[in-house]
Amino acid sequence: MRKFLLKLCYTVLPLWLAVVALVTVYYLVVIPEMKGDLGRLGKIPTGLYYQRDDDPAITQHTLYPTIQHADSIRLLGRCDILTCGDSFSQPDENGYQGYMVMNGLSFINYSPNGDLMSNPFQTAYGLMRQGYIDSTNVKMLLIESVERSLPLRLRQLNLSDTLIHEEEPAPKQVDKSWSLAEAKIFLEFQLGMREEENPVKQLQLDQPLFSGRYGNRLYIYADDVIPQLQSIPSEEYDSIRQKTEALFAEAAAKGIRLLILICPDKYDMYQQHIVANPYPKKTVNEDFRRIVGPRRDVVMGKEIIAPFIRRGEKDIYFWDDTHWNFKAIRTIADTLTSRYQEFVTQ
């Protein structure tokens, strides 16, 4: 028995201690430092190496209402701009609206739950066709979409579907238990053992374009480099052009101005600086600009902030996140404000 116990001490006990150490480090050190959406998705303790450079001059959540039900739009009265977009338009992701409020504009941000939020173009079209917005309560409708979702959203836009389907938010599930399985996934991600399953890709930049210890390291969302969404096929140009023009025509029929904002993917913005880039060039922004032409009521975020990155400006995007930093947001907000003044107050 004594020999058996000694053998256990030499074999099983070290393994058990290693497992306990892994789980303890993961839950006490790694999880508290998983900052930003990329840190959380990729189980990366980004907070150990990088501190966000947030703008203390603005608190977006106090500046304009975000509503989940279309019936609330008219209850809030007349506004300058109603926004309909994805995470780039939400206050907790440093929305551009807060800066535009500081420029003197009033906002309502429509952010419904469920599938409808996944396609702001469809959502906005339904709002117009169902009569929730017109010239009596909204001066401008701003539709925003991130680049990675643009081809699919425009492809799926159904001009025959005008219904608004809203869902109540699902209750958040909080798991406070310690899981060996989650700690194991963390370790495998760190060792590069589950590369295909990892939602976050790590690439090397040719110069430090972020602050912090690893400023020349680029983290991107894996969906940024899905092969089928790297460009808009030329055979879809006519269909997308017709759908886009239909959105502008519907807005004109309601007596409001439409402004479309496309927010570029982090990968797209930094792809020219990636060392030995294993992914193809992304051209969605350029393709969509080619489709719609030089019209000023389509704002391509890449065209506005790319010069900053070309000059080597750091932290245009957050190092630990898929979203842009306030340095980019302020510039985008100023551009949108000038377009509002150009189209609505002229």
Image (cartoon, rainbow, N blue to C red):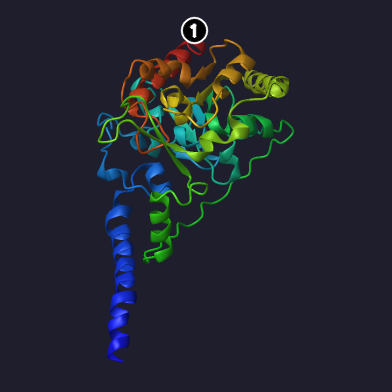
Amino acid bearing label 1 = Gln
Instruction: Give the residue displayed 42% in from the left and 25% down from the top.
Output: 270
Image coordinates of residue 252 in percent, x first then y, are: 63, 18
Give the crowd class for mark 1: few <14, some 14-19, many >=20 residues within 10 Å. few
Q: Is 182 situated above or below 73?
A: below
Foreground of the two, 148 or 4: 4
Q: Which quadrant of the structure image shows residue 70?
A: top right
Image coordinates of residue 319 in percent, x first then y, are: 34, 35
Q: Which quadrant of the structure image shows residue 244?
A: top right
Q: Which quadrant of the structure image shows residue 14?
A: bottom left
Instruction: Give the residue displayed 44% in from the left and 36% down from the top.
Output: 220
> Residue at the top extreme?
346
Left or right: residue 154 compared with residue 117: right
Task: Tell me the residue that label 1 is attached to.
Answer: 346
Foreground of the two, 336 or 110: 336
Instruction: Give the residue displayed 31% in from the left and 92% down from the top.
Output: 1
Using the rendered image of the protein, determine whether residue 157 is visible from the camera's viewpoint: no
Tag 1's secondary structure? loop
Image coordinates of residue 223 in percent, x first then y, are: 53, 38
